[in-house]
Amino acid sequence: MAANRQGSSAIPEVLQDTNLPVILILVTLVVGIAALLPLVQTSLATSTGGNVSRLEQLREDWQARLHEQEVNVARLGSLDRIESEAQERLKMVAPDSVTYLRVDAPAPAPQRIPSRYLSEEEGPVEGESLWEEFFGWLPLP
Amino acid sequence: MGKRRFTEVWRVWAVMAAIVLATGVVTLRLVQLQIIDHAQYAADARLIHYGQDTLADRRGALLDRNGYPLAASEAAFNVMVEKRAWEDPAEAQAAADSLAEATDASAAEMIRIVRDTEAFEVPVARGLNYGQGVAVRELRLPGVRLLEGSRRTYPEGNLAAQLLGFVGQENSGLTGLEIDLDSILGGSPGQVIYERDGIGNQLAFGDRSEIPSRPGANVVLSIDRYIQRLAEQELDRAISDNKAEGGTIIVIQPETGQVLAMASRPTFDVTKPDLSDNSKQALFRNRAITDTYEPGSIFKLVTMAAALDLGLVSPETWWYDEGVVNLSGWSIYNWDFSANGSQTVQQILSKSLNTGAVWLASLCGPTDFYDYIERFGFGVTSDSGLSGEVDGRVRTPDSDPEGWRPIDLATNSFGQGISVTPLQMAMAVAAIANDGVLMKPQLVNEIIDPLGGQVVEPEAVRQVMSAETARTLLDMMGVVSEGVPTAYLDVPGYSIGAKTGTANIATENGGYKPDAYISSLVGVAPLEDPAIAVLVKIDEPEGVPWGTVVAGPVFSRLVEKTLAYLKVPPTEEVFVSGLQD
């Protein structure tokens, strides 16, 4: 009996006081959660990747629609269309004679090229994300 | 016992032999797959697991001088189908029917294209608009994907068709400025290689490498869409009124050499160019630079400029017109066979006397006369940058010592026996209006590129004659136009200078086409400070062929509207009301 008591005293007191099955369950849970983490991480990454692809597609769609609208604007502003609208919808007719007036006001400034055809100015450079900064610190090749 | 032992050993050896044989077969097969045919299988695997796309960016726009697009690009989609995805006829038919509904294309044709191809995937429908593209994408058909590109559109329709040109299926220029500026407009395509899943979709976290594309630059032309349209309308009207074969109108800004309008007829439908009919391909060429003609009497301006600039004559110099010049066995008469007696140099131009032009050329002599022809830019391309531009033909004693004869000097003096392009002739007249400075014809004003644009500055070629001579010649042109009945040549409110011409049409065998003429007129306006120089050329009009009658009214209407559009104030007399300065 005395020997048994000495053997029991070698087990840490915490374990002696706690139910072993509970410990095993806890350990199993921790291991299970740890095993699930990479899966969750991969799932999140895949989901983020899908979102990025979807947003890229969305951006390309808007770009396509923008270009389509630019062409539509150009068609609406074409001389043939203006003349047709003037004659058919507004019932305008070509003048029989021209009257010239001299006014003190200066002539309108020459028309500028529409901004959509000008080269894009460089936008502000966006700051790096925390992750990019972190990887920047590492001595990676 | 011994027999049993032998049997057991035999069985063991048999099993071992079978294992060795199987191992050998497997090894040999592995050697074949992984070493001998490695490249083939690796390529097949790449084809299945990796997709490769060319990233075509937007082609730059061609804009008129005020920024209105004459040619622009919008997104367009090609539908790509993998051959293996349509191997099952029933599935292929179902997919093709769905695609046909979304794209207005023929299902049978799509199936035929996929069946006949040897490629991994093939485009079955091209140039879909945004709405059609979205409809196809939403079908989510296996093995079917959209490839985005762009489609060329011409918002102003067929305006300046021959000048602008058109692009092919691959969005590269085929004719006109579209091909001449292809390297600027086209940008540079990119490329993407990506890992894909079993139905061809890109894997979110698969391998991917991309070389980004670069969009093309926008190009601002010197063409003004309003003036170009006016020129084309007037040209169409003149051809219709005179039942002519065709014609050309060019409007130049003398000070800069910028081409404000360049119109030729016959033309083609730039929105649907017919490449299948070879006979119609001649319509694609820009006749203002590719075709030459004998200019006729408008060339007397060059002869006159030479004689005036050399100080040989003045507008008041007298000369006696006998009505005929006999030279080397040839007799040269005036266009109306008249003999006018004592005439001034001004009258030589006003009455367009051939005999007077011959006299002026003989005063100059061949060396100086051809020197001025060269200085005006004839005989060489004008360096407009347009492909297909020709030199024209000027035969001089130096260039063709064997072929040149003194009679050539005489006929050249009134614009026969020499061939020029309409653009060369227009630029020569613009030089007279620009204090004698010949400018390089300018068709591009600015290149707008995301990586840095470029503004094209006007470029002077040379001083052809003194500014005083140019002014004198302008005044003489003013007198010429005053002598033309206002029914044919009149721009109310403005003084103009002009010279008309009616030229024979040379044939390939060296003679002239009977009863066929080119009626032309070159002019400047306003005379005091020319804002525009104009060439009007009408080919083979029926009825009265005189340049005054055929080309004069065209010039009058065109210039009147153009000057008002350019806000060039008319002379004081026409102001009827308003606030005076």
Image (spheres, coloured by chain):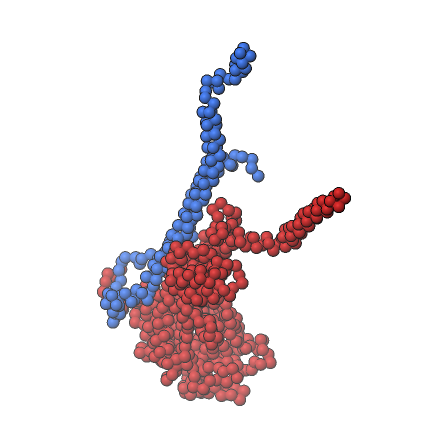
Q: Is residue B214 above or below residue B255?
A: above
Q: Quadrant of residue B5?
A: top right
Residue at x 27% of width, y 58% of height: A104
B341 and B51: which is toward the camera: B51
B244 and B538: which is toward the camera: B244
Q: Position of residue B228 (x, y in %)?
A: 38, 67
User: Chain letter for red?
Assistant: B
Residue at x 46% of width, y 81% of height: B505
Q: Position of residue B268 (x, y in %)?
A: 41, 72
Q: Quick one: quadrant of the N terminus of chain B?
A: top right
Residue at x 54% of width, y 35% of height: A138
B38 and A112: which is toward the camera: B38
Q: Quadrant of residue B318?
A: bottom left
User: Chain letter for blue?
Assistant: A
Q: Is residue B60 above or below residue B571?
A: above
Q: Position of residue B137 (x, y in %)?
A: 41, 55
How many marks the image carries: the answer is 0
A120 and B399: which is toward the camera: A120
Q: Quick one: quadrant of the C terminus of chain B?
A: bottom left
Q: Position of residue B211 (x, y in %)?
A: 51, 51
- Residue B90 visible to the viewer: yes
